[in-house]
Image: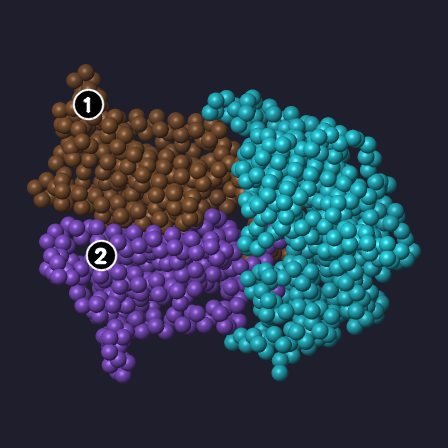
Amino acid sequence: MVQPPSMPSEQVMPGCSSIPGRDGRLVVEMQAIVKRFPGVLANDHVDFQLSLGEIHALLGENGAGKSTLMNVLAGLYRPDSGTILYKGQLVIFSSPRDAIDAGIGMIHQHFMLVPSQTVTENILLGLDQPRFRLKLPQYHKVVADLGDRFGLKVDPRAKIWQLSVGEQQRVEILKMLYRGAEVLIMDEPTAVLAPQEIEGLFNILRAMTDEGKSIIFISHKLQEVMTIADRVTVLRKGKVTAAGINTRETNRQELARLMVGREVLFHLEKEHRQPGEIVLTIQDVYAENDKGLPALRGVSLGVRSGEVVGLAGVAGNGQRELVQVITGMRKCDRGQVLLNGQDITNRPAGYGIQRGVAHVPEDRTHVGTAPNLSVTDNVIMKKYRQSPLARGIFLDHVAATHFANELKEAYDIIVPTVETPVRMLSGGNLQRVILAREISGKPALLVAMQPTRGLDVGAIEAVHRLLLSQRQAGAAILLVSEELEELLSLSDRTYVIYEGKIMGELQESNIETIGLMMTGTPLEQIRMGISEHV
Amino acid sequence: MDPVIILQAGVATGTVLLFATLGELFAERSGVLNLGVEGMMLLGAMSAFSIALTTGNPWIGLLVAMLAGGLISQIHAYIVITLQADQVVSGLALTFLGIGTSVVLGEGLSKAGTISLIPVFSIPLLSEIPILGTILFKNQSVLVYLGYFLTPAAWYYLNYTRPGMHLRAIGEHPATADTLGINVYRLRYFYVFVGGALAGLAGATISLAISPGWFSELTTAGQGWIAIGLVIFAQWDPLRAAVGSYAFGALRRLVLDIQGPTQLLGLRNPFYYNPYLGFYLQMLPYAFTIIVLVIGSREAIRKRLGAPAALGIPYIRGERGL
Amino acid sequence: MSEIETAQPNPWWKNFPIYVRFEPRLIEPPRWYPLAISLVAIVIALAIGGVIISAAGGNPFLSYAHIARASFGNIGVISDTIVKATPILLTSLACALAFRMRLWNIGAEGQFIMGAFGASAVVLVPILPPETSRWFFIPVMVLAGLVMGGLWGFIPGFLKAQFNVNEIISSLMLNYIAVSWINFWIFAVWTEGGFQMTPKFPENAWLPRLLDYAQTFPILRGLTTHAGLLLGIIAAIILWMVVYRSRWGYEIRLIGDNPRAAQYAGINIARNTVMVMVLSGALAGLGGMSEVSGFVHRLQTSPINAGYGFTGIIVAWLSKLNPLVVIPVSILFGALLLAGREIQPSGVPRMIQGIILVSLIASDFLLRNRVHIIRRGES
């Protein structure tokens, strides 16, 4: 009978003496951690403490150093200086394996799973058992039992690529539990979940702390931190601004201030604007995804000039495919896409570009820019076919450089020269390059997918302001975002997509309704249901 | 033009391709593309022949060939794994290096004389089986029998063992393997070595068993490249690799034999009466490789399968967005 | 912010007193850096080559000195060097263009051969009678070379665009097929008295050479440099303008750097794949035509099958895919090939080419990363 490895008890880590901890109930204590990367000080003498059985949130905006700090704890990075105490003893992790063996497991924001292998294989990966021959059927049973014990139901025989994102997350948690992890670090775990699934996750977390596990919860979402965490530590630009304060003794405003350093507006001033003519019409579109499975099943929506239309939904419900169909990067099998009345269905991308379709893609580095080409080469990507940049079959190099410099000024792109290769730019600057390129063409339709992902608050505000100014100028904007707050504050109307179908359209921002739609309940049903429950 | 003889010889010739293909298959499964197979095969062929000549012992020649192939491939491994340079260009450079070095060091070998070969024998009971026994088990070299063993062993290793699972993981999603404590870099070095050693073995099989001697570049005549194409056709599966390799071996043999007899299927044999048409026959293996590639590539598109996901991409710890 | 770990992949180095750390560069290295690194790479390559030559029983210093003298010693040999460099120039341009788009055209060799075949066919079939005026003969042969080479480039290009067939292997296989093809024609159809070559071309089919003008300029006596050089230089200039100054060149560079971004920008990758491969093949084919018409004056296996296609790969890489830089670099390699013919052991030039390429790739690493040598004990 195969058993998961037994849980490690007090172990002395190789090569260190033991120092008695200050507080016997402290599971993890990080002291004065410093971590540098080329050009940036990610952690600046950071202290962090985790007590037994608590859920401790690590809060900060993108780039504050939270993931770095936890990557140090989880053994992925070596700190430049500072110490880590685990259960009162000094430890040095030289690899993630050491940390996991000690009992500290990290569940990353981007799942560390092998898509083509089964759940059980993923859970067994890297372990010494089984010795040589894989005897999967036995291990399938062990995994299933473990899942039952913690309420994490998943089919051990399934291949990862067949699972939903929520199920994949459960596999990740099981992976750590199988190895006897006592400390679980979760990096932005709710980014991929719908509001109802988030509730489910929180229940699982509470169940685990009841069993004696301790959890570190990395997030930049204030509301969740207030809901689930017992204590919170706030990081700003690599430094600690609040260490382990009790969530019951604080509020969102204070946390936001600690996170950003100044008063944060939670609602952008959005001017009233009367929307104009219909610019984009999508009628009954059907399309497949890369695996040949249906991704869009009869989607219809419309966007008018001078309005921002939001598309809400949990990642993987067809948003990506819809954006690709609109921008000509994916074929749709049925249905129509109309731009200002003209049929652009299944036309190549260049067709739409020439008629005023701008696209800010989800993937900045792999789709939106060419990393080794200069800033100039990147900003002319949409306009190089027209004058003044094009002269017959030639490219006017001087005009292109001039254009790039203009954009550099106007959009505040921080770069030594416009000849610098774009791979050297930070995330925020990269997004500015892309926005500069797309917006400077005075587009009729702007499709923006996850435009603020991974950016710090200053950059996020700048992006929002740019989007709203385009709305003022009369562009039709389709905004696809997983950040519900951002979506609702910017949008005039919101559609919700679930499994390739539109669940409904909302004018008012009601989180509960939207949450229900995001998990599959059509709007009419909700409206009928609410009248029952009220 | 006896089909049984052709198949029998084909199995022998195919063994060369089998070794090279399996070797490259392992390297590519770990995520590293090694285009230097032709160079390493030639190096193996030369060193095997040369050592066998000087020591009189073909087995030592065999071992040295495998070692030579494996060690040279480590140059490629260093460049693409540690220095993270482009795998295509590095592989090509390795080919030139291998071919050039083999030709330089192999100077004068072709006039050097004969050597004792790897022993050839028949397996007692199995060779009695009608037709199949003659093809597979009669008068075949030890290396051919090794091939019979290697194929299922590779298949079992890949799909049913823990190290095999790790191999698949580092080729599909190295970041995952890394966070779980698998040393992606070290394993890739290892499997590139395996690939090189098997390529060297393939070369040694030519010069010590199949077509003994040293014919400068013509010794391998592009078989290393065919092997790389066969890996794609095999969709990275050892069993399919074997099918492809033996089929090609038979094809090569057919091309040779078809020029012999005066009658072909009851008609005048055009290849006998005009030997120059033989040049067109020479094209066949290469043309077939292209066809096989088209089949393999179309299948990959259709089944949405394909290469190991991380093939050709250097692994950098900490880089997001894999 | 880049969060790239600087962990060492090779744990067994841990016990050395000093170790080396790599750090990705944040800013571009100075302009002269790539050139300096390439030179250092070549020097190291020559050193390694010298070691191997010694191991094989030769004398490296004598060998290298011989190369220098035999290639640049006097105006006669300089002319010979240029003659050797001309086909390399064209195949390198072919490779430089294709590699820009990350299309690995290893088939320049085969395209070269088919170009030579096409040009020869014009003379030997014969498509044009021997008395045709030179002003007609040459352009038709050029066209034939371009078309046959382009066709040979079209096949792998089409297969890649339609079926995503790996162009390295398909173009390589076509190399072998091309060799068999011309072997048939040389041995069976056009053979001169049973030898491995065709009859000599009529003089109207020869590209003009410098020595043709020795009447007017006695200094040109005996110089075999031919108009193929001119064709090559013109091609290089045109190619430079295309890649760096034209819209198409921009598209090619974009596809080469990030095909998904190119698709997003509305560029048709499949069409460009085919067009670039055809043009690349045509350039190599032109090289073949220039070799048979300017130098050999017949179709025979020896220089046609000399590996110019493969040398082109290395020259292109060494020139960092810049068409103008290709010109001097191919002359350098012409020298290597010319003098290398007489070096014992043969195969040395090929081996040195391989070593140079390896050093180059390894040195590219230094362009993208800074190297720190750190004493253990420091932080």
Tag 2: amino acid: Phe
Residue under label 1: C134
The dot on residue B215 is: 2
Structural crowding at the residue carrying mark 1, measured as other residues with C-alpha within 10 Å and reported as few (<14), some (14–19) or many (≥20): some
- In the image, taking residue A317 as reference, residue C92 lies left or right, namely left
Q: Chain of mark 1?
A: C
Residue A310 appears in which quarter of the rendering?
A: top right
Q: Secondary structure at mark 2?
A: loop
Q: Colour of chain C?
A: brown
Expressed as whole percent of the image width and height from the top left, the position of residue A286 reads 60, 48
- In the image, taking residue B277 as reference, residue A475 lies left or right, namely right
Expressed as whole percent of the image width and height from the top left, the position of residue C349 reads 30, 45
Q: Colour of chain A?
A: cyan
Structural crowding at the residue carrying mark 2, measured as other residues with C-alpha within 10 Å and reported as few (<14), some (14–19) or many (≥20): some
Expressed as whole percent of the image width and height from the top left, the position of residue A195 reads 77, 55
Identify the residue at the far top of this view: C216
